[in-house]
Image: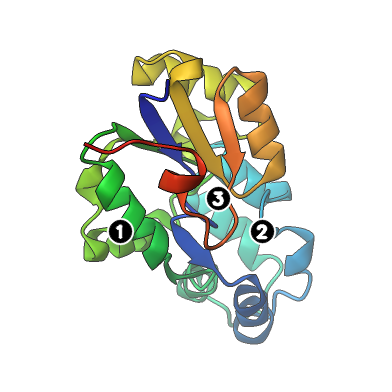
Amino acid sequence: MIKAVIFDMGGVILDLDMPRCIRNFKERAGFSDIKTYLDVYHQKGFISDLEEGLIDESEFYEECLRHCTKDATADDIKFCFNSLVAGANLDIIRQIILLSKDYPLFILSNNNPVCLKHEMEILDKQGVSGCFREFFFSFRLKMLKPGREIFDEVVRRTGFLPEEILFVDDSIANVEGARAAGLNAVRYKKGDDILAKYNLSLS
């Protein structure tokens, strides 16, 4: 029986626009090989290190600017990185509001300190920040999905058993990682009705 739901953030609660982000990095900052590091599901190199908490924000900017034109600034980098987020997925926002009345909700996201403020402002604007009992971000936990350890730690912190949790993510690798840790994990596709598809009851 499902007693709690954990949502991924990017690609589920927030819509992403990877082509726009890559274009901005190339045109505004001159970061021509940005595609080597940016991915819809799992980042690479120093961007992955940022999400895992292995480097801090200032170290990220320093490394990023090495790939850019000489006149590029940290503000340019922040603008480009934040342009990855296209806005809220209003369909999921509606479902979250309904679910929050009957289920404890959590967020587990591979995330970083550069984009987080912008992302949280979007959730605040939609009025759903308060729907979540706790937020789990990779750079704070110093672990990344789909590693087993991050799921084990998050399950421990929620206070629920793995089999009592539904985990919703758009990455098949993350879904498989969650299933290996004993969670009920499902891959989200745009337009999915979480309540109906996974038979979640509301009072």
* Position of 152 relative to 191 (above/below): above
Q: Rounded to the nearest whole Å, what is the CA distance between mark 3 and mark 1?
A: 27 Å
Q: Residue at x 37, y 18 (%)?
A: 157
Q: Residue at x 38, y 16 (%)?
A: 160
Mark 2 Cα-neighbour bin, 10 Å: few <14, some 14–19, many ≥20:
some
In the image: residue 153, left or right of residue 176: left
* Position of 190 relative to 203 (above/below): below
Secondary structure found at label 2? loop
Residue 149 falls in which quadrant of the image?
A: top right
- Kindly identify which residue carries mark 1: 123
- Kindly identify which residue carries mark 2: 40
- Kindly identify which residue carries mark 3: 59
Q: Amino acid at mark 3?
A: Glu
Tell me residue 185's x, y (percent): 58, 33
| C-beta proximity under 8 Å, tags 3 and 1 | no
In the image: residue 24, left or right of residue 82: right
Tell me residue 115's x, y (percent): 44, 59
Q: Amino acid at mark 1?
A: Leu
Q: Amino acid at mark 2?
A: Val
Q: Residue at x 45, y 61 (%)?
A: 14
Q: Rounded to the nearest whole Å, what is the CA distance between mark 3 and mark 2?
A: 22 Å
Q: Going from the N terminus, do you reach mark 3 or mark 2 first?
A: 2
